[in-house]
Image (tube, coloured by chain):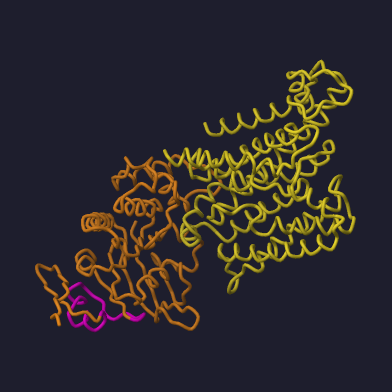
Chain colours: A orange, B yellow
Amino acid sequence: MSSSVQVRDLSVKVGKTTLLQPTSLTVGAGEWLSIIGPNGAGKSTLLRAIVGAAKSTGDIAIGGKSLREMKGTERARRVAWVPQNPIIPSGFLVIDYVLLGRTPHRPLLAAERPEDLAFVHQVLVELDLVELAERHVDSLSGGERQRVIIARALAQDAPVLLLDEPTTALDLGHQQEVLMLLDRLRRQGRTIVSTMHDLTLAGQYADRLVMLAEGEIAATGTATEVLTEANLSMYYNADVNVTVCDDLVLVAPRLRPRH
Amino acid sequence: MWLLAGTAFVIAAAVIALVVGPKPPSGATTEIPRWGAVLEALDRITPFGIDTGLTETQQSIVGNLRLPRVVFGLLVGASLAASGSTYQGIFRNPLASPYLLGIAAGGGLGATIAFVNDWGDGAGVFDGVQLGAFAGSLLAVGLTWAVGATGGSDRSTTALILAGIAVTSFFTAFQTFLQQRNADDIRQVYTWVLGGLNTSGWTEVLQLLPVALVLLPVLALAGRALDIMAVGEEEAVMLGLPVTQVRLVLIVVASLLTAASVAVSGLIGFVGLIIPHVVRLLFGASFRVIAPLSILFGAGFLVLCDLAARTLLPPAEIPIGVVTAFFGAPFFVFILRTTGRS
């Protein structure tokens, strides 16, 4: 079930603009790595490059196998990607949307097989979505919606999950709910790479952080190593208080004196 | 369940169209018995010899006038609606229709060129007008495909739609110019543009039938691929769908089918646009349902429209494009409002 992610000299250019400098990193099997960094640092670009959604140069290996040598279906069986703002087709039922995740496992023209339905049902149970199965996706709350999107990714049955800002636009309770869910999935052996905006939450849940700035890795390590006042001042241009308390790194903006 | 509803609708539409006569045959005073008409149709399309009790004239009316026209209407309606649902799925755009990528304008120009050069009159086996329209349609959609390539080989749906608009404008301009220079042919061109299901026996049916039999099943089965594409190109690729290839195949199939329909029946509007929406509003947003049901509902709808076209103002025929819009638009508004409330 678990698979490592290895990235070597991965870089992304659009026209003459370099969005991501050659970047190398390794995510161990069953590890949760969060990518942080200011707006425009290249977080989403790195994630999109790893999954193959952005054109890139360099090597990407999932579970030791080169991503570039994989066919589309094989890649989709190994890596599931949850974009920041996925298109959820209006009018779809939750069950139909989640079933799309079975695409890489079933023939294109055939009807869904019993095992696909069984697998999706299991995912719905796991994510506490069974009661929503026949609901229209349009009628879901923000938290439910995010759960349904993750359910579709889980239906792919891929050992590696890439999530772009999975908690943005959610309230605190729903953020916690989604992060606890990802934590559970990690404990089950999945490898998770996510981008995060909330630094405290990023440090709280991930095993390791990578801080990007201007398309390059600026810092990497545990939360206490990466989330320092110096780093956040230098790369985020932010004036913050960092408090460490029982391994929990709390990042809070410092009140600036009023003029 | 929904498949049953669709099939029932098609059969009902076909039977009604068979038993209601377009015009009283000259000299005949007796109405054709209703069951006789249905039995005669069954006699023609099944290998069983059925004694229908009809006179020879009546048999001929049902077998050579009404039945081929009904079958023709079924084929054209199914083709246009299937292509429409496919386009709407591929482009994830509710306004997409078979005519979007320039097929209508291309067919119109092709037919106009044929009319002004007296290559044909729009009827018969492989008539010049039909060939012109078919070639024009395919040329236009091919041009749109070529123009729609933005920055290398990528073809985003927006780029293709914009290219379709450009090609349509260009072809329409050319057609308008030709019409204006050849005022004598305007009436013929105009009649053709409005579309019609006038058949000369089984000729048109036999022209369209092989194309429809091969291509319609492809579009009926495309529903699942279209469902996957509903999450957008990028995510569909990430789900393992070979989007570029699937899209190319579906566009080629839907375009060929539309071009073939346009060639034999002119530009019948509205069916490809509205039928998939009606099906969506009634039966849900999944293309696994919309794709096959559009075929059935398109077939039934066009046959009913044709029935209205040939019986409402006898002995004159109303152009079928007028009927599809006149009845289709209010019906669509009705569906839109009633389902919108619930």
Screen quadrant of the C terminus of chain B: top left
Q: Position of residue A103 (x, y in %)?
A: 47, 51
Residue B54, image quadrant: top right
Q: Nearer the viewer, residue B46 or B54?
A: B54
Look at the picture and state if A9 lies above or below B219. below
Q: In the image, B261: left or right of A91?
A: right
Q: Position of residue B207 (x, y in %)?
A: 80, 44
* Count of residue discs: 0
| Left or right of residue B225: residue B266 | right
Queried whether the magenta region covers residue B24, the answer comes back as: no
* Range of residues picked out in magenta: A214-236
Q: Residue A235 at x, y = what percent?
A: 26, 81
Q: In the figure, is residue B262 to the left or right of B86? A: right
Which residue does the image show at 75% across and 51% down from the upper left?
B193
Q: Is residue A221 located in the magenta-colored stretch of the structure?
A: yes
Against B9, residue B138 (above or below) is below
Compared with A231, A29 (above or below) is above
Relative to the observer, which residue lies in front, B155 or B65? B65
Instruction: Residue A39: give x, y in percent of width and height.
Output: 32, 75
Q: Which picture quadrant has residue A20?
A: bottom left
User: Which residue occupies the extreme left position in the image?
Assistant: A245
**The one of B62 and A155 positioned closer to us in this rendering:** B62
Observer-nearest residue: B171 or B300? B171
Identify the residue at horizontal 45%, vertical 52% (top origin).
Answer: A89
